[in-house]
């Protein structure tokens, strides 16, 4: 969807600061790597379910080569000392017709300021616009902030959940 690839809106953090939510583009590679470098090992492990120190070229290609149909990615960008910086990102990937898996990461210095909520809201808008019927997520049980965010949006825990991973589903209207 061409309009999704051009998605860009201004939103506001809990403290009133402006944040830009926009489509990820291939030119974001350096800024994405900078954001990853500012993200703790714990936060990366909560996102990827394993310790991550870096990403291979094939992983970077996967994260940056977005078609905006089966794979949609947004970044949260805020002004830091007069320069835009990526401070979070979210994406959904269609795993079967009408159903997509959704995930987020926010750098530690910006956690708790509403960025995950903002990204979720905008990804849900795009998912509905794309005709998706269901969003799914997998969350580590100790990631209480992400579980709280998903529950706030109406995600329900599924019977597939285990002590290692909580499976969640949101049916889109």
Image (spheres, rainbow, N blue to C red):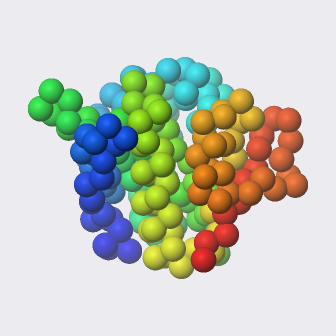
The answer to whether residue 51 is seen in the rendering is yes
Q: Residue at x 55, y 29 (%)?
A: 44
Q: Nearer the viewer, residue 148 or 138?
A: 148
The count of marks equals 0
The vertical placement of 41 against 25, above or below, is: above
Above or below, 57 relative to 71: above
Q: Is residue 36 in view?
A: no
* Image: 166 above or below 136: above
* Residue nearest the observer in this picture, 108 or 15: 15
Splitting the image into 4 quarters, where does residue 23 fall?
bottom left
Name, please, the residue furthest toward the front.
Answer: 15
| Residue 171 picture location, percent across and down | 67, 69
* Quarter of the rendering occupied by the N terminus: bottom left
Instruction: Give how far across and how far down residue 83 sits, in percent.
Output: 15, 33
Q: In this view, does 144 lie to the left or right of 161?
A: left
Question: Which percent across, then down, holds residue 53?
Answer: 52, 21
Please identify the quarter of the rendering in which residue 158 is found. Answer: bottom right
Horizontal side of 100 relative to 14 (left or right) equals: right
Q: Residue at x 65, y 59 (%)?
A: 154
The C terminus sits in image quarter = bottom right
């Amino acid at each position: 969807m061409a309009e999704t690839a051009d998605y860009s809106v201004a939103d506001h953090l809990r403290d009133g600061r402006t944040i830009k939510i926009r489509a990820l583009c291939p030119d974001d590679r350096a800024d994405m790597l900078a954001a990853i470098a500012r993200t703790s090992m714990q936060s990366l492990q909560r996102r990827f379910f394993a310790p991550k120190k870096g990403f291979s070229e094939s992983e970077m290609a996967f994260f940056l080569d977005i078609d905006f149909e089966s794979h949609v990615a947004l970044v949260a960008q805020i002004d830091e000392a007069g320069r835009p910086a990526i401070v979070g990102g979210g994406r959904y990937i269609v795993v079967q017709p009408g159903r997509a898996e959704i995930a987020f990461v926010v750098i530690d210095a910006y956690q708790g300021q509403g960025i995950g909520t903002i990204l979720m809201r905008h990804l849900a808008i795009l998912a509905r616009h794309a005709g998706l019927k269901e969003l799914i997520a997998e969350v580590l049980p100790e990631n209480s902030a992400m579980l709280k965010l998903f529950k706030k949006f109406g995600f329900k825990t599924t019977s597939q959940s285990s002590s290692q991973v909580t499976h969640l589903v949101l049916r889109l209207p």
